Amino acid sequence: MPCIKNLIEKHKLLPVLLAALLTAAVLAALVKLTGTIGPRLNCVTVAEQKGVYDLTGIGDLEGTIALLTPGTAYYPNTYLEPKNADTAVPESIHRYKELRADYLSQKFILRLPDNSDVYMLTFSLSGRHAMRVYVNGRLAGQAGRPGTTKEETEVWENNITCYGAAVNGKMEIILNSAQFYHAKRGASLAQLSLSKSGAVPDMFFYDRMKGILTVGVFLSAAAMLTALYLLLSPVRANLYFAMASVIMALRELLRSKAWIYFPIPGNLSFMLEYMSMVLLTIFLSLYLGQYAIGRFLQGVRYTAIIGSCVYGVCLLFGDSIFYTSVLKYYQLLLMLCIVPGIIRLFWNMRRPTKEQSVAIYGIGVFYIAAVYDILLYSGFLGDGLKLPISENAMVVFALTQAFSLFLMNSRVLGEAKETERKLAAEKEALEDLNRMKTEFLGNISHELKTPLTVMSGYAQTIRQLAQGPGKLDNEKVAHRMKLISSEAERLSLMVGQILDVTRMEEGRMSMELKPCYVDEIIHGAVETHYPMLNKNANRLEIQIERGLPAVNADSARISQVIVNLISNAVRFTANGLITISAKREDAHILICVTDTGSGINREQLPYIFERYYHRQKSGGGQDTGTGLGLYICRNIVEQHGGSIWLESEEGRGTSVFFTLPVL
């Protein structure tokens, strides 16, 4: 079992093609089976003897079909009528192939039991004809319009059914048939099938009803795909196959002879039979373009489309004799495109997706059915009853392609919804970012204005003291200069944060790593920035473990982290204690800044290290910091190979920890 599973995984196309082959075999079996369903009828072939078909020797005409082969004579380029039937000169059928006749007549003289029984007469010919039947001197039926020129003639189907009764045990039948439209042949000789009226159903009625049902299937698929294209998924493959389904419905309508129930002129139906082949080739080529990967398949596809367009022009503007004469070249072109194109397509999709597997299965069924029918009519499969399966395979093909498109549309819609969801999330994130940037600009404007206002005020006070009468109070000046220095430090810190974020976003924030000691960095940071840190009547303690090893760090950046953390602690702590500690833990130095301030709300903790995020002060109100300090701290610590985290409880203070690896 594992070996079979591995083989299927490696050659995914093989089981798909085997399933297509099996389906074609089942179709052939079902067609043969349906051909045997129905009442068992005895068929008797009767030959002409001395110009008469003698049916009196058939014992039971109730359940028998008599097949009357063409007689020994016919009347080329002549329309027999009851008034001239005895004077016209016949021609031997041995010269039928030599003498092309676009219209002709045949006579059937039948001997039947002398009774009043009514018989059903069905004449079958090769190809579409215009036909007229006389029985015992009276017009019994007409299909199309027989004429002596092409312009006068309107072809119909290849059969006609009428009814008649014997007179004194004899039935005289005259058949007129005309065919001006095909280059290969003129009018053909008919075979007559005779049976008692009502004993045998119309042999073409089943085909017509099946054809109408098949047309309904094709049109339903076309309607579904068109609605899908217009309402949900504007994928061109949906539209192309919807159009192909409409053309397949038209072909089935013509093939099954069900078109005779609709007001379609016979000559138009003759042209549409060829035009439908052209349109079907074009739309299927456009539809299969989604699988045509590579120059070869694209070349095959465009060759088939261009060739079909050229032949379509011949159909629209050319004479029927012309376009039926060049049909063989068009068919040859299609064979040269289809055979290598399908083989290359299968090769390209050796490992198909689910929707491709369904499409290939349908293509395979139709392709195998077409090959089967070619072999069938070529005589390679014997001389028995020829029951083609291509039309049934076309239904399988249409249904599988529709299902493949359904799978594709489901996938496309799923991807579109996922993309829409991601875009909505990105839009929301961008809106949040834009909002935070707006808040940041407002806050930073206030933050920059505050130290500038303080510095300006104290500078004006010092000037007033210097310009005032009496001796200058050095202590007052020194105090005010200290405050100016503190605000300048604060201003420098904020500007530095903005510049650092810009460098980080542009990838220009570099670190100058070298061996240094954490205790020296901490003491240096506190001493340098003491005026800024000594606020709100807080007490500052430093607790550093003795003998800490060196770390490989950028001392200026680590000092910046420590100053940012202490500055945050000072901002949210009043009349409290701020502690800076450092100790060794395994292969890292753990630095902690702890305060006894307002703490942080639990809901804010997951976002505290994000850019532009602002803490809420205890008791409400938003802090007017830049919202960049902790974001910058995290970036610096992580670039040193350390980590940073925060522990806080609202109303009881905050502790921020970060680590640095030791040398």
Image (spheres, rainbow, N blue to C red):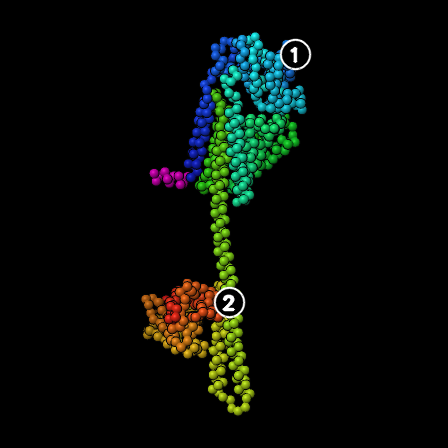
What amino acid is at disc 2?
Phe
Q: Which element is circle 2 on?
A: helix
Which residue is found at the position 51% from the left and 70% from the top? 444
Residue labelled with disc 2: 440
Q: Residue at x 50, y 32 (%)?
A: 395
Location of residue 92 (image quadrant): top right
Q: Whole-percent x and y of residue 539?
A: 39, 78
Question: Residue 351: x percent and y percent?
Answer: 44, 41
* Nearer-the-camera pick, 608 or 566: 608
Vertically, is 437 above or below 30? below
SS label for mark 1? loop
- Magenta-highlighted residues: 1-11
User: Is residue 324 in view from this perspective?
Assistant: no
Magenta-drawn stretch contains 321: no
Residue tagged by mark 1? 83
Distance, label 2 to label 1, CA atoms, is 109 Å
Residue 279, compared with residue 624, is above or below; it is above
Left or right: where does residue 557 sit relative to residue 292? left
In the image, taking residue 83 as reference, residue 491 lies left or right, namely: left
Q: How many marks?
A: 2
